[in-house]
Amino acid sequence: MTTDLVDLPPRFGMDRPAFDKIGSRPAGELRLAASVVLVRDAAAGPGVEVFLLERAAEMAFAAGMSVFPGGGLDAADREALAEGLVDADAAEDAARSWDTAPDAAAALIACAVRETYEETGVLLGGAAPPAAGTRERLVARETGLRDVVGHVEAAALRPWARWVTPEGMPRRYDTAFFVAGVPDGQEPDGATTEAVGAGWCAPAQALHEWEDGVRALMPPTWAVLSELAAADSAAGLLDAAAGRRPEPVTPSFRPDGERVGLVVPSHAFGVDR
Protein backbone atom coordinates (compact mmCIF):
# COMPACT_ATOMS: atom_id res chain seq x y z
CA MET A 1 0.00 0.00 0.00
CA THR A 2 1.33 3.41 -0.92
CA THR A 3 1.77 6.12 1.70
CA ASP A 4 1.43 8.98 -0.80
CA LEU A 5 -0.88 11.73 0.41
CA VAL A 6 -3.53 13.37 -1.74
CA ASP A 7 -4.91 16.84 -1.05
CA LEU A 8 -8.68 16.94 -0.86
CA PRO A 9 -10.42 19.85 -2.61
CA PRO A 10 -9.95 23.16 -0.78
CA ARG A 11 -13.65 23.28 0.06
CA PHE A 12 -13.07 20.57 2.66
CA GLY A 13 -10.61 22.77 4.51
CA MET A 14 -11.34 25.53 7.00
CA ASP A 15 -9.88 28.82 8.08
CA ARG A 16 -7.40 28.87 10.95
CA PRO A 17 -9.76 30.37 13.59
CA ALA A 18 -12.36 27.65 12.90
CA PHE A 19 -9.67 24.97 13.11
CA ASP A 20 -8.35 26.38 16.39
CA LYS A 21 -11.87 26.47 17.80
CA ILE A 22 -12.42 22.82 17.00
CA GLY A 23 -9.04 21.93 18.47
CA SER A 24 -9.96 23.62 21.74
CA ARG A 25 -12.85 21.22 22.34
CA PRO A 26 -12.47 17.83 24.06
CA ALA A 27 -11.79 15.05 21.59
CA GLY A 28 -14.79 12.85 20.93
CA GLU A 29 -14.87 9.13 21.66
CA LEU A 30 -14.33 7.00 18.56
CA ARG A 31 -17.59 5.23 17.74
CA LEU A 32 -18.13 2.37 15.32
CA ALA A 33 -20.59 3.03 12.51
CA ALA A 34 -21.80 1.46 9.27
CA SER A 35 -23.04 3.00 6.03
CA VAL A 36 -24.56 1.31 2.98
CA VAL A 37 -24.17 2.43 -0.61
CA LEU A 38 -27.28 1.12 -2.36
CA VAL A 39 -26.49 0.75 -6.07
CA ARG A 40 -28.43 -0.01 -9.23
CA ASP A 41 -27.73 0.18 -12.94
CA ALA A 42 -28.05 3.66 -14.40
CA ALA A 43 -31.36 4.36 -16.09
CA ALA A 44 -29.65 5.50 -19.30
CA GLY A 45 -26.46 3.93 -20.58
CA PRO A 46 -23.62 2.25 -18.67
CA GLY A 47 -22.80 3.17 -15.10
CA VAL A 48 -24.54 3.05 -11.74
CA GLU A 49 -26.78 5.17 -9.58
CA VAL A 50 -26.62 5.41 -5.78
CA PHE A 51 -29.29 6.26 -3.24
CA LEU A 52 -28.58 9.45 -1.28
CA LEU A 53 -30.35 10.99 1.68
CA GLU A 54 -30.29 14.72 2.35
CA ARG A 55 -29.87 15.17 6.09
CA ALA A 56 -32.18 17.57 7.89
CA ALA A 57 -30.68 20.96 8.76
CA GLU A 58 -31.43 20.52 12.47
CA MET A 59 -29.44 17.28 12.82
CA ALA A 60 -26.55 17.49 15.27
CA PHE A 61 -24.24 15.63 12.88
CA ALA A 62 -23.85 16.11 9.11
CA ALA A 63 -26.69 18.62 8.96
CA GLY A 64 -27.72 19.37 5.37
CA MET A 65 -25.30 16.83 3.91
CA SER A 66 -26.06 14.26 1.23
CA VAL A 67 -25.18 10.89 2.74
CA PHE A 68 -25.59 7.18 2.25
CA PRO A 69 -27.93 5.43 4.70
CA GLY A 70 -26.18 4.52 7.93
CA GLY A 71 -25.42 5.36 11.52
CA GLY A 72 -23.68 4.33 14.70
CA LEU A 73 -23.81 0.91 16.32
CA ASP A 74 -26.23 0.41 19.18
CA ALA A 75 -26.16 -2.13 21.99
CA ALA A 76 -28.39 -4.61 20.18
CA ASP A 77 -26.12 -4.62 17.11
CA ARG A 78 -23.26 -5.82 19.30
CA GLU A 79 -25.20 -8.98 20.15
CA ALA A 80 -25.64 -10.00 16.50
CA LEU A 81 -23.16 -12.88 16.64
CA ALA A 82 -24.21 -14.15 20.05
CA GLU A 83 -27.89 -14.09 19.06
CA GLY A 84 -27.29 -15.83 15.74
CA LEU A 85 -28.45 -12.89 13.63
CA VAL A 86 -25.17 -13.26 11.73
CA ASP A 87 -23.71 -16.76 11.60
CA ALA A 88 -20.18 -17.57 12.72
CA ASP A 89 -18.74 -18.30 9.26
CA ALA A 90 -20.05 -15.02 7.83
CA ALA A 91 -18.71 -13.16 10.84
CA GLU A 92 -15.28 -14.73 10.34
CA ASP A 93 -15.26 -13.71 6.68
CA ALA A 94 -16.32 -10.17 7.53
CA ALA A 95 -13.73 -9.98 10.29
CA ARG A 96 -11.00 -10.62 7.71
CA SER A 97 -12.41 -7.92 5.45
CA TRP A 98 -12.55 -5.30 8.20
CA ASP A 99 -9.49 -6.47 10.16
CA THR A 100 -11.46 -6.83 13.36
CA ALA A 101 -12.93 -9.47 15.66
CA PRO A 102 -15.86 -11.61 14.47
CA ASP A 103 -18.28 -10.13 17.01
CA ALA A 104 -17.39 -6.59 15.91
CA ALA A 105 -17.76 -7.54 12.23
CA ALA A 106 -21.16 -9.10 12.91
CA ALA A 107 -22.18 -5.91 14.72
CA LEU A 108 -21.23 -3.82 11.67
CA ILE A 109 -23.37 -6.03 9.44
CA ALA A 110 -26.32 -5.81 11.83
CA CYS A 111 -25.97 -2.04 12.06
CA ALA A 112 -25.79 -1.72 8.27
CA VAL A 113 -28.97 -3.78 7.79
CA ARG A 114 -30.86 -2.05 10.61
CA GLU A 115 -29.96 1.51 9.58
CA THR A 116 -30.77 0.85 5.93
CA TYR A 117 -34.16 -0.57 6.82
CA GLU A 118 -34.95 2.26 9.26
CA GLU A 119 -33.91 5.02 6.84
CA THR A 120 -35.01 3.63 3.48
CA GLY A 121 -37.39 0.73 4.07
CA VAL A 122 -35.04 -1.62 2.19
CA LEU A 123 -34.38 -4.84 4.10
CA LEU A 124 -31.04 -6.33 3.06
CA GLY A 125 -29.91 -9.88 3.53
CA GLY A 126 -33.20 -11.19 4.89
CA ALA A 127 -36.46 -12.72 3.80
CA ALA A 128 -39.38 -10.86 2.24
CA PRO A 129 -40.17 -7.46 3.76
CA PRO A 130 -42.10 -7.88 7.04
CA ALA A 131 -45.58 -6.75 7.95
CA ALA A 132 -46.66 -3.12 7.88
CA GLY A 133 -45.59 -1.18 10.95
CA THR A 134 -42.51 -3.32 11.64
CA ARG A 135 -40.16 -0.58 10.45
CA GLU A 136 -41.75 1.96 12.79
CA ARG A 137 -41.52 -0.45 15.73
CA LEU A 138 -37.86 -1.06 14.99
CA VAL A 139 -37.14 2.67 14.90
CA ALA A 140 -38.96 3.07 18.23
CA ARG A 141 -37.00 0.08 19.64
CA GLU A 142 -40.23 -1.75 20.34
CA THR A 143 -38.80 -4.72 18.46
CA GLY A 144 -35.32 -5.87 17.47
CA LEU A 145 -33.70 -6.74 14.15
CA ARG A 146 -33.51 -10.39 15.23
CA ASP A 147 -37.31 -10.43 15.45
CA VAL A 148 -37.62 -8.72 12.05
CA VAL A 149 -35.37 -10.90 9.90
CA GLY A 150 -34.38 -13.86 12.06
CA HIS A 151 -31.09 -14.28 10.21
CA VAL A 152 -29.08 -12.00 7.93
CA GLU A 153 -27.48 -13.32 4.75
CA ALA A 154 -24.30 -11.28 5.11
CA ALA A 155 -23.24 -11.88 1.48
CA ALA A 156 -25.76 -9.21 0.47
CA LEU A 157 -23.37 -6.63 1.90
CA ARG A 158 -19.95 -6.18 0.28
CA PRO A 159 -17.10 -4.23 1.94
CA TRP A 160 -16.01 -1.09 0.15
CA ALA A 161 -14.29 1.57 2.28
CA ARG A 162 -13.42 2.45 5.85
CA TRP A 163 -13.01 6.02 7.08
CA VAL A 164 -11.86 7.17 10.52
CA THR A 165 -12.46 10.72 11.76
CA PRO A 166 -9.20 12.49 12.68
CA GLU A 167 -8.21 12.77 16.32
CA GLY A 168 -9.21 16.00 17.99
CA MET A 169 -12.62 16.25 16.34
CA PRO A 170 -15.59 16.49 18.71
CA ARG A 171 -17.50 13.70 16.90
CA ARG A 172 -15.44 10.76 15.75
CA TYR A 173 -16.49 7.65 13.84
CA ASP A 174 -14.79 4.55 12.48
CA THR A 175 -17.20 3.90 9.63
CA ALA A 176 -17.46 0.78 7.49
CA PHE A 177 -18.93 1.50 4.04
CA PHE A 178 -20.68 -1.43 2.38
CA VAL A 179 -22.13 -1.66 -1.13
CA ALA A 180 -25.35 -3.56 -1.80
CA GLY A 181 -27.97 -4.03 -4.45
CA VAL A 182 -31.65 -3.52 -3.72
CA PRO A 183 -33.53 -6.84 -3.39
CA ASP A 184 -36.19 -7.57 -5.98
CA GLY A 185 -39.56 -6.10 -5.08
CA GLN A 186 -38.15 -3.41 -2.82
CA GLU A 187 -37.54 0.30 -3.43
CA PRO A 188 -35.89 2.78 -1.05
CA ASP A 189 -38.08 5.66 0.06
CA GLY A 190 -36.03 7.82 2.42
CA ALA A 191 -39.01 8.12 4.79
CA THR A 192 -37.03 9.01 7.91
CA THR A 193 -37.20 11.99 10.23
CA GLU A 194 -33.44 12.40 9.79
CA ALA A 195 -33.76 13.39 6.11
CA VAL A 196 -35.65 16.02 4.14
CA GLY A 197 -35.05 14.49 0.73
CA ALA A 198 -33.82 11.32 -0.92
CA GLY A 199 -33.37 9.77 -4.34
CA TRP A 200 -31.22 7.95 -6.86
CA CYS A 201 -28.37 9.85 -8.45
CA ALA A 202 -25.42 9.01 -10.69
CA PRO A 203 -22.16 9.48 -8.76
CA ALA A 204 -20.81 11.87 -11.42
CA GLN A 205 -23.97 13.96 -11.22
CA ALA A 206 -23.74 14.17 -7.43
CA LEU A 207 -20.12 15.30 -7.75
CA HIS A 208 -21.04 17.94 -10.34
CA GLU A 209 -23.79 19.23 -8.06
CA TRP A 210 -21.28 19.44 -5.22
CA GLU A 211 -18.88 21.38 -7.46
CA ASP A 212 -21.74 23.76 -8.36
CA GLY A 213 -22.54 24.30 -4.69
CA VAL A 214 -26.04 22.82 -4.81
CA ARG A 215 -25.19 19.62 -2.91
CA ALA A 216 -23.17 19.27 0.30
CA LEU A 217 -20.88 16.28 0.75
CA MET A 218 -18.51 15.11 3.46
CA PRO A 219 -15.04 13.86 2.46
CA PRO A 220 -15.85 10.11 2.77
CA THR A 221 -18.99 10.45 0.66
CA TRP A 222 -17.14 12.53 -1.93
CA ALA A 223 -14.32 9.96 -2.12
CA VAL A 224 -16.65 6.97 -2.44
CA LEU A 225 -18.64 8.74 -5.15
CA SER A 226 -15.39 9.52 -6.96
CA GLU A 227 -14.58 5.81 -7.08
CA LEU A 228 -18.07 4.69 -8.06
CA ALA A 229 -18.26 7.17 -10.93
CA ALA A 230 -16.05 4.79 -12.95
CA ALA A 231 -18.27 1.71 -12.41
CA ASP A 232 -19.85 0.21 -15.53
CA SER A 233 -22.65 -1.73 -13.84
CA ALA A 234 -24.05 -2.63 -10.45
CA ALA A 235 -23.22 -6.30 -10.94
CA GLY A 236 -19.64 -5.50 -11.88
CA LEU A 237 -19.30 -3.21 -8.89
CA LEU A 238 -20.60 -5.82 -6.48
CA ASP A 239 -18.27 -8.43 -7.97
CA ALA A 240 -15.33 -6.06 -7.54
CA ALA A 241 -16.27 -5.52 -3.89
CA ALA A 242 -16.36 -9.23 -3.04
CA GLY A 243 -13.40 -10.06 -0.85
CA ARG A 244 -12.27 -6.43 -0.68
CA ARG A 245 -10.31 -5.56 2.48
CA PRO A 246 -10.60 -1.80 2.96
CA GLU A 247 -7.60 -0.05 4.46
CA PRO A 248 -8.62 2.55 7.06
CA VAL A 249 -8.51 6.11 5.75
CA THR A 250 -7.81 8.76 8.36
CA PRO A 251 -7.62 12.31 7.00
CA SER A 252 -4.97 14.59 8.44
CA PHE A 253 -4.75 18.36 8.57
CA ARG A 254 -2.31 20.36 6.46
CA PRO A 255 -1.89 24.02 7.54
CA ASP A 256 -1.31 26.46 4.70
CA GLY A 257 -1.19 30.03 5.88
CA GLU A 258 -4.62 31.11 7.11
CA ARG A 259 -6.23 27.92 5.79
CA VAL A 260 -6.05 24.35 7.02
CA GLY A 261 -6.57 21.70 4.36
CA LEU A 262 -7.20 17.97 4.49
CA VAL A 263 -5.00 15.25 3.04
CA VAL A 264 -5.68 11.51 2.79
CA PRO A 265 -3.60 8.50 1.76
CA SER A 266 -4.08 7.71 -1.91
CA HIS A 267 -5.65 4.33 -1.18
CA ALA A 268 -8.76 6.31 -0.19
CA PHE A 269 -9.56 6.25 -3.91
CA GLY A 270 -8.75 2.58 -4.45
CA VAL A 271 -5.72 3.41 -6.61
CA ASP A 272 -2.14 4.58 -6.28
CA ARG A 273 -1.84 8.25 -7.15
Image (cartoon, rainbow, N blue to C red):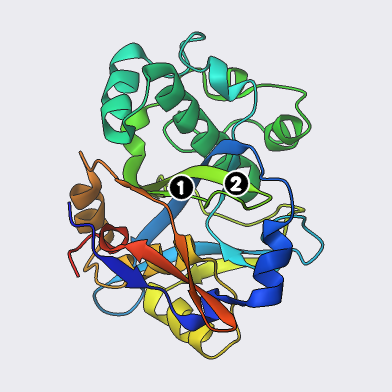
Q: Which residue is mark 2?
A: 172
For residue 211, side relative to residue 273 (left or right): right
Q: Is residue 153 above or below residue 264?
A: above
Crowd rating for badge 2 (residues with CA inside 10 Å; few <14, some 14–19, many 20+) = some
Q: Nearer the viewer, residue 67 or 7?
A: 7
Q: Nearer the viewer, residue 112 or 133?
A: 112
In the rendering, at what x and y percent does residue 67 appear? 56, 61
Q: Amino acid at mark 2?
A: Arg
Element assignment for label 2: strand
* Quarter assignment of residue 257: bottom right
Q: Which residue is mark 1?
A: 185
Crowd rating for badge 1 (residues with CA inside 10 Å; few <14, some 14–19, many 20+) = few
* Quarter assignment of residue 130: top right
- Residue at coordinates 32% horizontally, 42% vertically from top-left? 158
Q: CA distance from mark 1 to mark 2?
A: 36 Å
- Residue at coordinates 42% horizontally, 19% vertically from top-left? 86
Q: Residue furthest front?
A: 257
Q: Amino acid at mark 1?
A: Gly
Q: Is residue 184 above or below residue 41?
A: above
User: What is the total number of numbered labels drawn onto the structure image?
Assistant: 2
Q: Earlier in the sequence, mark 1 or mark 2?
A: 2
In the rendering, at what x and y percent does residue 43 appear? 36, 74
Is any part of residue 128 visible from this angle?
Answer: yes
For residue 140, side relative to residue 73 (left or right): right
Q: Is residue 53 above or below residue 11?
A: above
Q: Nearer the viewer, residue 85 or 265?
A: 265
- Residue at coordinates 36% horizontally, 39% vertically from top-left? 157
- Say the numbered circle drawn on residue 40: none
Element assignment for label 1: loop
